[in-house]
């Protein structure tokens, strides 16, 4: 169609009340996607927008739900249902949206993203001016064949339209009267696309299929240390990225203390608090690790998980990074020139997820039916879902516990599967857990889950089992121990070692004693120290001291180790000394589990999402993962 | 006979002030109005600072007059470099200034002064008895804030006004929305005036001093952007301001005190403005004038009534300014480029509480070498003090009790709307 | 029982309290949730019985110090309101000169010797005098953040400040980086929470919310040098709200 017809088409779309037209327009000397009032504002000659069109599908701030805490359980999911048309999306951004679709809709469909995506039509546009820092020409993301509803090519006096979907075709025919393209027109479009790669100033020395290998071989390359020294930790590189999808969630109360909302905001792995857990631990404290993680995630972990390099070469990160250390093109080219050739493996365990597929974000109402204080810090809660259904968990899985107005916290389930109620052992350590303490029996909380893989009980059958639990680690372990006790004949000898700080900190003492009464079950309790005057009938000393004297058949023994981060290294060393093969050691790890479904990114441990592939791992699967222990 | 001294922090004013009442028995012997706020020495703070950073520092003198200090310092520095700004910039500056007048006047009249007239302790109790008036006040003040926020970026310490212009202008759509909001609510300003016109203003609150304000050099029309100093009937050029006021330090107050070189106190503020400028042309302003218009007046309490009157003016002037801006079309102008050189400049403005003077000396590298800031409260400081002494004497002779006298004294203090945190940043005048 | 709340001010512009008043109709909601027992800018009554004390302004004189210690003694929770209270703010700029020097400049040879009203010492942030439980930074504070802190305190959640730089909010708002406009910005080392208000209006961040716990100062200086900003100018800007003698 002619340029005039194209502009008329756009103006008709703008005048249509049903939908909002978001186009590329100038913002000072830069460009952005924003509502346009007239086709004249549309700038198809743009190079790149400050933020990618992702913001229309996953906004920087998004209300997930609203609630009213003056009522028992009053929660409404808030979904954006407005229809939108994005005009002028460049091919690299179309590909980035396809990646986002894969992440948010491929598994564990995110209903908020889904609602927006379904209501959004994409009119893509071929690139007229190559952005200065872009290297999409080297990645093949400068052109696109699908993922759009319409694709337009501005040929000066003419605009060529490629139809991508039925919806796009319908839109075109409703609001315009396009003529048929001639062979000459098609040639012009082809020529424009073919000539593009030569216009790029920045080129990759290796193709995108080489990224994985390069990164595997350069985990300790000096570039990570050198560049991270210049890093401001401002997070800009991840925030402007069209393929970054990590998020954080926060509860915001109105000042009247009645209504509030749960808000999802963009987060980024360069920011320090990204891996911070309630206990105060930061799992990627060193800036070098954070800086490196971004590259590994984009170039190695996501390709391993999803089959694509999570970089489309738009160059936004490079443009926005003040010290200029965020450019993947620079970094990959450096690695290609000076490879260390020291291969590190980052295996991702293949785990069939037992979790939920729908309704991911809004918690179910549940009621506290029993509350029992265990220690100064820990309380055991018995919870019942208001739906009357069973939780349906496996031993070792966790749930996300919500208190509206405060937030969510991941808690392991401590009771064995089955039954109309389940138990949670909660240590008062953060906002949610502190608030929980003030709730009474009969009050409502929210539950999401269960999440995570849990222990594979079938795999344990017929084996001797050695449980090694430190502190709170007994909470998830108890779920499995109870299961084992309930199915005692399916398992061999059982040894339970439990250690905690001092006699006052002991958890589930009643259970420990009663398990000890069962046939062929040995229970040993130890405390790090016993202050004068305390009554204590167990051992004194670190939990590692309980292992050497044990009499066991190492080949047939499975060691299940759960405890604070510091404990693993020492306990595993002792188990190895007892000749238990690595394959027989199982651990459960703690990270900042937030979404529970491998999207928010907080719990990632190199390539592994602890909330999906974990928290239970075979030691063999993670022992070489640098970020595991 | 035993001396009885009362020291009372004045509530519901900006900043810390105290009134010292000295009684001998039941007879009032002496009154001192004192500003006790911690001294902040702003004149020194800007020394050696690059001229561009100065408006951002001095705007922190006072939050209620934040736009006033920003504009006065910007004008003074522009004056030092002989910078001419565009007409668009002038219009937007006056518009944000109207926003700050509205916010300040409606905050002061309703929440700080009105409870006195109605015999209530504070605005919260006012809300219990007169929710509709409080809601009206919140609306009027809120729209004043909306103007400041749209033009300045935020109501307190606005960032958009800079030396040479603005960093950013609002869009046409935003201005149209603002204009419509102003038009929809203009009647509230008249209703507010009606309320203040119905209040009782006791006659003993008469003061005796010359009035001063900035007036237009071109006509007698009421304005808040005057360029010439008026002291009653006399007119002075801006650079001759020392012929009108002169500062000195007084031992009972951290604020300096200004007086006329001839020795008398000078009053600035709404009362002065309405006593000197007498021509009006906006419809709602004229409507209010017909309701009740006691000006010229010597009753200090009429300063509050005057503020309610000026609220209508500022509202309608803001509407007019927006119309002019929309008619002209909004141009995407950048602030005027300035190359630093040696200079000296004065910037002055009629701000909510009266006339504000900023004066700077700048060296060739663009660093400030000296500064002088005279705020309205510093000017009124002496007249408040004298006024209290005079009225106190009258009241005491009439046999009023200590409690009654104290209440009246506080009412006087509040009638002047003293912005005490400003006044404490007073600086010495250097005779050059 | 509604928590009792009191507001106090020391040397400041009182913009932070004004920002509270600027909550407009939400003030009505606020007084439903808390009982305001002292707020000199808006009310006459005063009580020494309060749970939460909000303190605006910095400490300039021994008499301020005494008063603040008394407030600390009465309050269960003490919250610093705004740059002057949190970090000293612009008031600290005068610490570049000696007290006598400043007094002489401002008050000349007037007879103020021995008058306690004028008895100033170098400006202090309030945590240099008493323990502070929470901070609401900014010049002025942001009323949204104030409301958030109050609601957190009321619901029993520990208020937490963003622990990331202003750049994060700049990016979320799609601002043009002010460095690209040739201006100076402290955003990369300054604590976010202001919604990047200055860069949003194409002005550089002045650091009024204070620096991050772990600001990357060396990286910031590298960036400033790269953009041609001279060291002495850099120091002046670092010092505007975060004055520390000869530190940066």
Image (cartoon, rainbow, N blue to C red):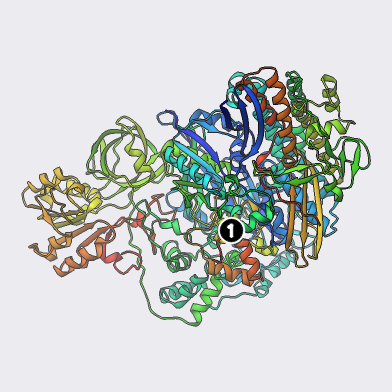
Spot occupied by residue A47 in the image (x, y as percentages of width and height): 68, 64
Name the quadrant of the N terminus of chain C: top left
A593 vs B150, left or right, is left
Answer whether residue A59 is visible to the viewer in this image: no
Please tell me which residue lies in front, A218 or B59: B59
Residue visible at 80% across and 65% down?
B341
Answer whether residue B235 is visible to the viewer in this image: yes
Please tell me which residue lies in front, A161 or C84: C84
Q: Which residue is mark 1?
A: C95
Spot occupied by residue B372 in the image (x, y as percentages of width and height): 75, 52
Q: Residue furthest front?
A: B1
Name the quadrant of the C terminus of chain C: bottom right
A562 vs B62, left or right, is left
Q: Quadrant of residue A446?
A: top left
Q: Which chain is mark 1 on?
A: C
Q: Quadrant of residue A82?
A: top right
Residue visible at 58% across and 38% down?
C20
Residue visible at 75% across and 46% down?
B247
Q: Secondary structure at mark 1?
A: helix
Please tell me which residue lies in front, C217 or B53: B53
């Amino acid at each position: 169609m002619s340029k005039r017809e194209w502009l008329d088409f756009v103006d008709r779309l703008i005048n249509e009340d049903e939908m909002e037209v978001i186009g590329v327009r100038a913002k000072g000397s830069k460009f952005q996607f924003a509502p346009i009032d007239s086709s004249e504002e549309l700038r198809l000659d743009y190079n790149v927008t400050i933020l990618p069109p992702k913001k229309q599908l996953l906004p920087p701030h998004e209300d997930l739900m609203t609630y009213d805490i003056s009522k028992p359980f009053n929660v409404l999911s808030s979904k954006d249902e407005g229809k939108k048309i994005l005009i002028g999306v460049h091919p690299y951004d179309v590909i980035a949206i396809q990646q986002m679709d894969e992440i948010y809709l491929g598994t564990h469909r995110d209903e908020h993203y889904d609602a927006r995506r379904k209501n959004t039509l994409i009119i893509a546009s071929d690139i007229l001016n190559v952005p200065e820092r872009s290297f999409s020409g080297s990645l093949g993301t400068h052109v696109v064949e699908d993922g759009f509803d319409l694709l337009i090519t501005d040929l000066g006096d003419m605009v060529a339209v490629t139809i991508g979907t039925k919806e796009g075709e319908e839109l075109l025919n409703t609001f315009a009267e396009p003529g048929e393209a001639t062979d000459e027109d098609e040639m012009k479009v082809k020529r424009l696309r073919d000539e593009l790669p030569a216009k790029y100033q920045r080129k990759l020395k290796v193709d995108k299929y080489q990224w994985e290998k390069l990164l595997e071989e350069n985990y300790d390359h000096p570039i990570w240390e050198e560049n991270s020294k210049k890093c401001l930790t401002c997070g800009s590189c991840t925030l402007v990225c069209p393929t970054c999808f990590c998020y954080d969630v926060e509860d915001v109360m109105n000042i009247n203390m009645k209504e509030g909302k749960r808000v999802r905001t963009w987060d980024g792995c360069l920011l320090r608090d990204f891996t911070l857990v309630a206990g105060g631990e930061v799992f990627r404290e060193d800036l070098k690790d954070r800086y490196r993680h971004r590259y590994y995630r984009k170039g190695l972990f996501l390709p391993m998980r999803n089959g694509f390099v999570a970089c489309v070469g738009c160059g936004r990160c490079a443009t926005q990074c003040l010290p200029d250390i965020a450019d993947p093109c620079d970094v990959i080219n450096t690695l290609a020139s000076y490879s260390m050739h020291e291969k590190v493996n980052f295996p991702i365990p293949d785990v069939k997820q037992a979790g939920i597929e729908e309704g991911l974000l809004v918690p179910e109402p549940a009621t506290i039916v029993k509350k029992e204080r265990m220690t100064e810090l820990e309380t055991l809660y018995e919870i019942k879902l208001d739906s009357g259904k069973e939780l349906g968990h496996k031993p070792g899985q966790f749930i996300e516990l919500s208190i509206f107005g405060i937030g969510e916290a991941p808690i392991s389930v401590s009771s064995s599967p089955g039954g109309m109620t389940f138990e949670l052992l909660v240590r008062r350590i953060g906002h949610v857990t502190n608030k929980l303490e003030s709730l009474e029996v009969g009050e409502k909380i929210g539950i999401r889950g269960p999440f995570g893989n849990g222990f594979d009980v079938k795999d344990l059958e017929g084996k001797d089992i050695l449980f090694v639990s430190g502190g709170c680690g007994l909470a998830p372990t108890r779920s499995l121990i109870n299961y084992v006790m309930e199915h005692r004949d399916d398992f061999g000898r059982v040894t339970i070692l439990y250690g905690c700080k001092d006699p006052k900190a002991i958890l589930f003492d009643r259970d420990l004693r009663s398990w000890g009464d069962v046939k062929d079950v040995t229970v040993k309790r130890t405390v790090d120290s016993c202050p004068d005057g305390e009554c204590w009938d167990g051992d004194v000393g670190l939990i590692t001291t309980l292992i050497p004297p044990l009499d066991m058949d190492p080949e047939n023994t499975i060691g299940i180790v759960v405890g604070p981060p510091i404990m693993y290294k020492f306990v595993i060393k002792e188990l190895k000394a007892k000749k238990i093969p690595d394959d027989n050691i199982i651990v459960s790890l703690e990270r900042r589990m937030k979404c529970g479904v491998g999207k928010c990114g907080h719990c990632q441990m190199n390539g592994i999402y602890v909330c999906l592939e974990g928290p239970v791992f075979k030691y063999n699967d993670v022992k070489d993962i640098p970020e595991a222990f | 006979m035993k001396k009885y001294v009362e020291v009372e922090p004045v509530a519901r004013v900006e900043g810390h002030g105290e009134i010292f009442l000295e009684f001998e028995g039941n007879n009032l012997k002496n009154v001192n109005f004192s500003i006790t706020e911690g001294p902040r020495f702003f004149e020194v703070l800007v020394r050696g600072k690059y001229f561009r950073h100065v408006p951002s520092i001095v705007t922190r003198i006072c939050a209620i007059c934040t736009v006033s200090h920003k504009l006065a310092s910007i004008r003074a520095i522009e004056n030092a470099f002989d910078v001419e700004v565009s007409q668009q910039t002038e219009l937007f500056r006056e518009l944000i200034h109207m926003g700050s007048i509205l916010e300040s006047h409606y905050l002061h009249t309703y929440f700080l002064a009105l409870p006195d007239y109605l015999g209530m302790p504070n605005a919260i109790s006012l809300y219990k008895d007169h929710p509709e008036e409080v809601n009206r006040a919140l609306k009027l003040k809120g729209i004043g804030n909306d103007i400041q926020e749209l033009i300045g970026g935020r109501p307190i310490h606005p960032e958009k006004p800079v030396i040479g212009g603005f960093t950013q202008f609002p869009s046409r759509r935003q201005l149209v929305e603002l204009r419509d909001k102003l038009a929809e609510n203009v009647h509230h300003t008249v209703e507010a005036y009606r309320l203040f016109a119905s209040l009782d203003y006791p006659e003993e609150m008469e003061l005796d001093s010359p009035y001063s304000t900035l007036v237009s050099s071109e006509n007698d029309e009421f304005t808040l952007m005057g360029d010439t100093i008026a002291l009653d009937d006399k007119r002075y050029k801006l650079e001759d301001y020392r012929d009108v006021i002169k500062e000195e330090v007084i031992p009972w107050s951290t604020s300096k005190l200004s007086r006329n070189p001839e020795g008398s106190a000078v009053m600035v503020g709404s009362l002065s403005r309405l006593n000197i400028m007498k021509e009006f042309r906006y419809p709602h302003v004229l409507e209010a004038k017909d309701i009740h218009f006691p000006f010229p007046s010597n009753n200090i309490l009429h300063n509050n009534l005057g503020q309610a009157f000026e609220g209508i003016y500022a509202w309608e002037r803001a509407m007019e300014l927006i119309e002019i801006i929309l008619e002209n079309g909004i141009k995407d102008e950048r602030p005027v480029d300035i190359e630093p050189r040696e200079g000296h400049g004065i910037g002055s403005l009629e701000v909510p509480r009266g006339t504000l003077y900023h004066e700077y000396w700048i060296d060739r590298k663009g660093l400030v070498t000296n500064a002088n800031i005279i705020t309205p409260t510093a000017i009124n400081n002496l007249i408040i003090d004298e006024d209290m002494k005079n009225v106190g004497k009258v009241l005491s002779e009439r046999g009023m009790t200590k409690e009654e006298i104290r209440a009246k004294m506080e009412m006087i203090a509040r009638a002047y709307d003293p912005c005490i945190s400003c006044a404490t940043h007073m600086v010495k005048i250097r005779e050059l | 029982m509604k928590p009792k709340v009191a507001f106090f001010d020391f040397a400041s512009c009182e913009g932070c309290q004004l920002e509270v008043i600027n909550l407009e109709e939400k003030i009505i909601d606020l007084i439903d949730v808390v009982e305001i027992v002292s707020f000199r800018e808006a009310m006459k009554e005063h009580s020494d019985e309060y749970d939460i004390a909000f303190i605006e302004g910095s400490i300039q004189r021994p008499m301020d110090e005494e008063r603040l210690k008394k407030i600390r003694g009465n309050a269960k929770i003490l919250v610093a309101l705004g740059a002057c209270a949190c970090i000293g703010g612009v008031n600290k700029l005068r610490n570049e000169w000696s007290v006598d020097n400043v007094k002489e400049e401002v008050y000349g040879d007037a007879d103020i010797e021995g008058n306690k009203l004028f008895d100033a010492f170098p400006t202090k942030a309030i945590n240099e005098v008493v323990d502070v439980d929470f901070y609401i930074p900014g010049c002025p504070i942001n009323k949204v953040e104030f409301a958030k802190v109050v609601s957190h305190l009321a619901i029993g959640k520990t208020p937490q400040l963003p622990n990331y730089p202003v750049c994060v909010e700049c990016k979320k708002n799609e601002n043009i980086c002010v460095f690209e406009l040739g201006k100076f910005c402290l955003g990369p080392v300054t604590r976010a929470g202001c919604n990047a208000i200055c860069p949003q209006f194409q002005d550089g961040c002045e650091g009024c919310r204070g620096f991050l716990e772990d600001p990357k100062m060396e990286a910031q200086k590298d960036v400033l040098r790269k953009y041609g900003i001279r060291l002495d100018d850099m120091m002046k800007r670092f010092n505007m709200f975060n004055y520390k003698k000869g530190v940066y």
